[in-house]
Amino acid sequence: MSDLGGVEEELRGAVRGEVDFSVTARALNTMDASNYRRVPLGVLAPRDADDVAAALAVCRERGVPVVARGAGTSIAGQATGTGLVLDFTRHMNRIVSLDAESRTAVVQPGVICDGLRGAAAPHGLTFGPDPSTHNRCTLGGMIGNNSCGSHSVAWGTTADNVASLSVVSGAGERLTLGQGWTGAPEGLRALVEGELELLRTGFPELPRRISGYALDAMLPERGVDLARAFCGSEGTLGVITEAVVRLVDSPRARALAVLGYADESAAAEAAAGLLPYGPLTVEGMAADLVRGSEGLPKGGAWLFAETGGASESEARARAEAITRAVAGDTVDSVVVTDPAGQRVLWRVREDASGTATRMPDGSEAWPGWEDCAVPPARLGAYLRDFRGLLAEHGLRGTPYGHFGDGCIHVRIDFDLMSEVGVRRFRRFSEDLALLVVAHGGSLSGEHGDGQARAELLPTMYGADLVRLFERVKGVWDPADVLNPGMLVRPAPLDSNLRFDPLPRQPVDVAFGYPHDGGDFSAAVRRCVGVAKCRTTSAGSGGGVMCPSFRATGEEEHSTRGRARLLHEMLAGDVVTDGWRSEEVRDALDLCLSCKGCRSDCPVGVDMATYKAEFLHHHYEGRRRPAAHYAMGWLPLWLRLASRTRTAGAANALAGVGVLASLAKRVGGIAPEREIPRLAGETFRRWFRERRPATAPEGPTVVLWPDTFTDHLSPAVGRAAVRVLEDAGLRVVVPPGDVCCGLTYVSTGQLDRARTVMRRTLDRMGPLLDSDAPLVVLEPSCAAALKSDLVELLPGDERAGELAARVRTFASVLEELAPEWSPPRIGRPVVGQTHCHQHAVLGDAAERRLREKAGLVGELSGGCCGLAGNFGFEAGHYEVSVACAEEQLLPAVRSAAPEPEGGPVILADGFSCRTQLEQLGEGSRGRHLAEVLAEGLDGG
């Protein structure tokens, strides 16, 4: 790189888009979803094609490399670079037009695939290619990589669905590429026509040949399709500014046949035989990639064959025809026509891109050989040889993918942290390239070559064709500024590894990180960049992750963005201040600690824990923000108010505007917030002083008096006692003050949290000697006892014993009073499943209890946005409201008021109820225990 002085200033003067050379911007763009890492000079979010052309002119003059980037989910390293990153997701993300009659759409490169599919759906159309990242990947990235997806057996690759492209070449020419030579850069036609024999003989014929440049698309007998030839060029020839894409008819109804086979080989052998039946998909995966078997038929491996039709019965008939045709080869099968059931099954398949990054024993696995493809008829033989090669090198991996197209995805447990492991990675890569070619395959069948495979292209194409690739690159980009080191003249496949700058010794941390061997660096490495956290909706099925990204749309407020900054903090050459980094602190500031990523991220990134860890070190020996003292120490302040019997006085003072404003300012509380009122009588005092008529003789349960139930909503505790005793259970409450430490954990005061937790374990000693379960009404406290307690006190056996006792209100009723019948409420419900319940505890028992009580309907996903202290902290109000407005508040507004017989508003978490009270225009959410208790009392 040369003459970099003043590049930022010159770019600012040349473009209208945002130019960002900050530490945060650079750190966020060091990696994609591959094994590679490059530190860019800066980032530009261009507003239009003029910005792109102007930026390329500056970079060409200055010798600065340029890499075009969409969602950054590329798996071969092609979305990383050392120069200027062009981020198309911020501005150039519009669907310019959609013509249903011609079945075409004009899109900018930053359009999300699902955005286009959603716009086409009302016309009965869709965009055929749909990678597993379809809800976050961009059309520009799909064109650059020639992406495919699960429906390619029906609708082909992205190249098959592109009509024309508007691009700016590396030489600065603005070109329109389509059929014929019009728009070709000068010299390209003469070069191609001089090498026709090589083009006719040098390319293998198979549906998923993605490797190299598709120069054979410019053969005269193939119609000279410049747009097709450009697809898959990985940003090395030109930068796309607009594309005309083709749309296809979307079947009105779909059915999914899931076919169970004895093993992976049997499924692979059978895949090609399904193609004559015209399926929309033929996907394959084995049992070791499945977290849960819900909905899957028996078997050790499965094929997912989707069919379409004008009606549900027609789609089902086609799916059943497939199941009948292969009945002699399958172990079991199921046909699903219900859209919700199909979504559940498809999530199992799509999440494989993340679950594959962990082996069954929890050890790490990595991309690099993610998507080789062979002729479908050779898939079974290839997989057997592939498994043999893994064993020969002492490696493990679990193949899955597009069996109908012969394309296999796999993550392999390469050791990329040691010299010995990296050498093995290289030897295996060289041997696998030979194996793929021996089977007539392509090194890349979907994600492109990038740095991961480009070095090995001579194995597939030979030296003459690779030299022609280099000459073609020279025509388009004579200064070699566009994504250098990719596809042609590539960097070695074992250089620029993302792991190189990471510390080799475990970092001293507070949490135990039991799933990562106690290694914080390994925990951060969990994020491989698949970017499921960058979706624009929480999705179906009650998903949560990542509410702050959906509220802001900024990468630094996504789970992946925060993980990237933590990675760079550990690396130390971009983020240089370690735990004191203000860049990391600011990115984590808008993390709600909702724990949604813990369950929704395919690799189980737990950003709430990482945030608490960071805050612990960041403020060690320093003054903390006022909110950490006001809300982090909330249990202490509330106990003090109870003991001094000053709750009434505190409530009165909170009602005086001037005093309330002063208190909020001193306590770091958002001025827009109302201070919750303290209960006049705590739950624990009520429980001590009550005189029950008769004591149930059934099993004993310990009811946890969490801070929120005890001091702020004791009615929930009283209702729970009423219901539990009606179910025949004997309720006791722990002696003395106990606390899960949640508020200290969420503010990163981990030394204090451990002190509180140990004191709690001391006081819970007698109860741990019994077999009584611990019923926790507040989901966030239950999650803290279930996870944070064990991970902060990994050496204390009592922590594990207590965590094992934790039960939710519904689960203890199901477990200890299975014959008890709740009151029949017979009302619909709205509300939201608590995010910690979703992430740590699960809500299956709650769903079953609601069903028994006649409370019908689904609760929404997402996060309420208050999230404990988050929504009360100054500076968080707008994001908190945006999170609530995503799902919770619209669902509640759509419900009729309860007195008119409308839905019951359920909110088991104190934060959720408080958010509804303050933002929901008087809506009152109730804990399930309250609703059932009222039913028992005839309410």
Image (cartoon, rainbow, N blue to C red):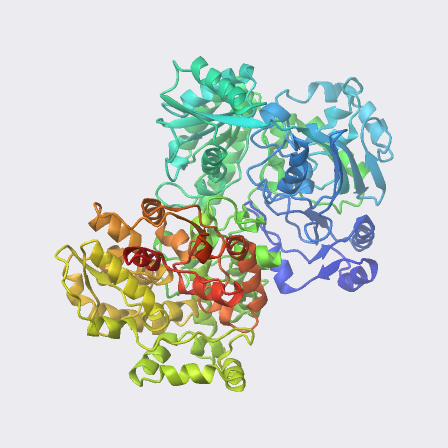
Q: From the viewer's side, name the closer residue of 837 and 76.
A: 837
Give the quadrant of the C terminus. Answer: bottom left
Residue 786 percent coordinates (x, y): 31, 58
Quarter location, residue 763: bottom left
Up the image or down, 788 lies above or below 208; here it is: below
In the displayed orientation, state which residue is furthest to the left. Answer: 697
State left or right for residue 391 relative to residue 530: left
Which of the two residues, 274 or 266, is positioned nearer the viewer here? 274
The percent position of residue 332, horizontal first and vertical second, equals 37, 22
Q: Is residue 849 left or right of residue 626?
A: left
Question: Where, by quadrant of the figure, is residue 476 drawn?
Answer: top right
The quadrant in which residue 835 appears is bottom left
- Residue 464, percent from left and from top: 71, 27
Quadrant position of the N terminus in the picture: bottom right
| Residue drawn at x 26%, y 57% as measured from the top left | 723
Is residue 94 at all visible to an observer of this figure? yes
Residue at x 54%, y 56% (from the top left corner): 893
Q: Locate residue 262, reporting x and y percent.
A: 36, 23
| On screen, residue 125 above or below 801 | above
Please say if 279 is above or below 505. above
> Foreground residue, 522 or 259?
259
In the rendered structure, the answer to whether residue 417 lies left or right of residue 175 reads left
Q: As rendered, which of 464 and 873 lies closer to the eye? A: 873
Residue 808 visible in the displayed image? no
Answer left or right for 104 relative to 441.
Answer: right
x 39%, y 70%: residue: 743
Number of numbered discs overlaid on the protein picture: 0
